[in-house]
Amino acid sequence: MKAVLINPPYSRLRGTKESTEMVTPIGLSYIAAYLKSEGHDVLVYDSNYSPVERLPRFNNLKKLFDSFDKYADALKLEDHPVWDECAKVVEREKPDVVGVSVLSPVRGAALRIARICKSVDPAVKVVFGGYHPSGYPEDVLSQDCVDAVVRGEGEKTFSEYVKAWGGAGALRDIPGLSFKDNGSVVHNQDRDLIEDLDSLPFPTDFLLERVTGKAPIQYGRGCPFGCKFCSDIVIWKRRTRYRSAENVVDEMTDVIKRKKLREFTFIDGTFNINREKVVVLCELLLRKKM
């Protein structure tokens, strides 16, 4: 099966870039690596990035608010070059399934991409995942252009969805999936979080295609807190899980060897919530002379 995973445009439409948008989202990269390990043909298309456009980073909220109208206006344009680019990617790749990562601010752009996919090939299955669909699956499934929602952690649920459309399995048997069935929305039971994070393949090839500075890396997933301003609870359910320090160092070694990068940014929401885990990792890095 062929899958295309898409990060919708946001800052690219707005004309300014946040520091957190400098690399392909790590969630999509992990899902892509997992699909590849399962034998699927997969492409990650980051429509928020252009090799020919250099967007300035905004350094205050006023610039962010002043540029938001540009994003809203771009959603209404039929001939915006980003939408044409998206259509060409789908036409070229001819995917069986398209996965779209959706934060709430980019809901409009994600739906626009879904409509483009359906206009190119009405038979293609469009699946939304990420924080917004996990929190509001009914909202996105009310749209004709969205076929299903992956709620929560995405690797296994999305992989099983792809297999099901390839003839191996039934949609109703996939935990963590919401989908349409004869006009009704079906919410399968929640999927348990992945306990053995070391079992997941490294996202290196998909995550670092264009990185020239620091490589993002993740030691653990989740956060035990429930801050009102944060959506982590939607995915991680106030639980934290860690990879082994050895697994993290193996990934860092792989990045250094193949990508020639020696600076890393840990993107954990609460990297130092477990003091013992941090100490173990740091001591291992010292022993490895890294």
Image (cartoon, grey):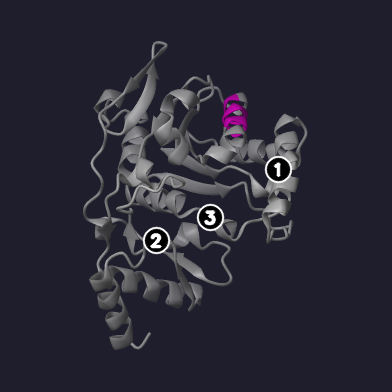
Q: Nearer the viewer, residue 274 or 139?
A: 274
* Residue identifier under label 2: 268
- Count residues near mark 2 (Cα–Cα under 10 Å), then give few for <14, some for 14-19, many for 20+: some
What amino acid type is highlighted by mark number 2? Answer: Asp
- Count residues near mark 1 (Cα–Cα under 10 Å), then give few for <14, some for 14-19, many for 20+: some
Residue 211 is tagged as: none
Q: Position of residue 252 (x, y in %)?
A: 39, 73
Q: Is residue 233 left or right of residue 146?
A: left
* Residue identifier under label 1: 68
Q: Position of residue 63 (x, y in %)?
A: 73, 53
First in sequence, mark 2 or 3: give its number. 3
- For the residue labelled by badge 3, is the local secondary structure a helix, a strand or a loop? loop
Please state the extent of the stretch shown in magenta in the rendering.
111-118
Q: Is residue 115 magenta?
A: yes
* Residue identifier under label 3: 24
Q: Nearer the viewer, mark 3 or mark 1?
A: 1
Residue found at x 30% / y 34%: 176
Q: CA distance from mark 1 to mark 2?
A: 28 Å
First in sequence, mark 3 or 1: give its number. 3
- Count residues near mark 3 (Cα–Cα under 10 Å), then give few for <14, some for 14-19, many for 20+: many
User: Can the viewer see residue 192?
Assistant: yes
Query: Do the residues bearing badges 3 and 1 touch, measured as CB atoms within 8 Å?
Result: no
Residue found at x 64% / y 39%: 86
Residue that sits furthest to the front in the current view: 228
What amino acid type is highlighted by mark number 3? Answer: Thr
